[in-house]
Image (spheres, rainbow, N blue to C red):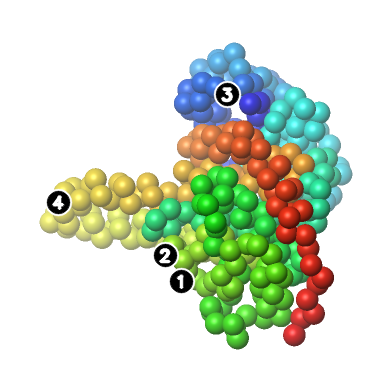
Amino acid sequence: MRLAVDVMGGDHGPEELLQGVKLALAAEPGLGELYLVGPQAELESLCARIGLLDPRVRVHPATEVLSMGDDPGLAVRRKKDSSILRAIELVREGTADAIISSGNTGALLAGATIRLGRLKGVRRPALACILPTLKGAWVLVDGGANPEGTPELLLQFAIMGSAYSKAMLGVANPRVGVLSNGSEDGKGNDLTRATVALIRKTDLNCQGYCEGYDLFLDGIDVAVCDGFVGNIVLKSVESLGKAVRAMLKEELTATWTRMLGAKLAEGGLRRIAARMNPEVYGGALLLGLNGCAVKIHGSAKRDTLRHAISQTRRFVELQLNDAIVRDLARCAEPEPVAAS
């Protein structure tokens, strides 16, 4: 498998992501070429400095960088030599099988949709994010690609999220729920009620509504929502994780007796941290593209990219796009349900 990695646009600069590439190449001997996209002289100098000398590494030049503050639509049209667009073009022309980027999410979505196109039957791509539960993991879709949605869009997110859960997490019959403010049928709003009605007409394992309590206590496998709600959930979870880690560190180092107890419980604490670590799930996959694009956090460090490379390799090898097209055709969209 060949990857195009946009190493520009992240919070920690390209060197941190190059270290992630180095880790991935050491851990994945079966990887093919990795195209590092960005300013050629700068990247070649950094590769030499950190010892990234693997013959599978190629530097692909790009003279511009899309910042997080750039307007995605304008930037895609005006910064045609940006690292994101050059990496996408490597996928479009068949030089690479997938792109990974920590840059501007909107620009990645717009550029990939325009240049790669959508799978047959897909209205809009959606971000699929994997998050931990007590017993494994669940999929949030949409994680932020579509701030507004319709019942027909959310139905497609459910179908794609279910296919993703089956392939990537090994869930035989994923439980699919529409994220709402309660599990009772009377809860929700016009959008969620109409979405549940559509999903129930398919052969998906529809659970009706799911709520916040279900997400991390193994109550659901795929939670469906529009990108506005999904992005709030995602960022709230990330901030809570950071707050819990900070509080644990503060409390467990407050006295010598607590430090002794923490030392005795060190193994268990490490295992809990590993289970809760979002980095092990890599990035958020843009489902529905005629290709593969993975978004990693702007603040991503080397371990995140290492795991994202492994995740992307599995996505390509499992031919998940073929499964999505088949499932969309099987769950042929019924007539829209009028909102009550």
Asked if marks 2 and 1 touch (Cβ < 8 Å), the reply is: yes
How many labels were placed on the picture? 4
Residue, disc 2: 217
Q: Nearer the viewer, mark 4 or mark 1?
A: 1
Q: Position of residue 158 (x, y in %)?
A: 66, 60
Q: Nearer the viewer, mark 3 or mark 4?
A: 3
Q: How far apart in space, not on screen, are marks 2 and 3 (Cα)?
A: 35 Å
Q: Quadrant of residue 123?
A: bottom right
Of helix, strand and loop, which one carries label 2? loop
Q: Position of residue 163 (x, y in %)?
A: 63, 51
Residue, disc 1: 213
297, above or below 135, in the image: above
Nearer-N-terminus badge (4/1) = 1
Q: Amino acid at mark 1?
A: Tyr
Nearer-N-terminus badge (2/3) = 3
Q: How far apart in space, not on screen, are marks 3 and 4 (Cα)?
A: 44 Å
Q: How far apart in space, not on screen, are marks 4 and 1 (Cα)?
A: 34 Å
Of helix, strand and loop, which one carries label 4? helix
118, 52: nearer the viewer? 118
* Quadrant showing the N terminus: top right
Left or right side of 333 for 164? left
Q: Nearer the viewer, mark 4 or mark 2?
A: 2
Of helix, strand and loop, which one carries label 1? helix
Q: Amino acid at mark 2?
A: Leu
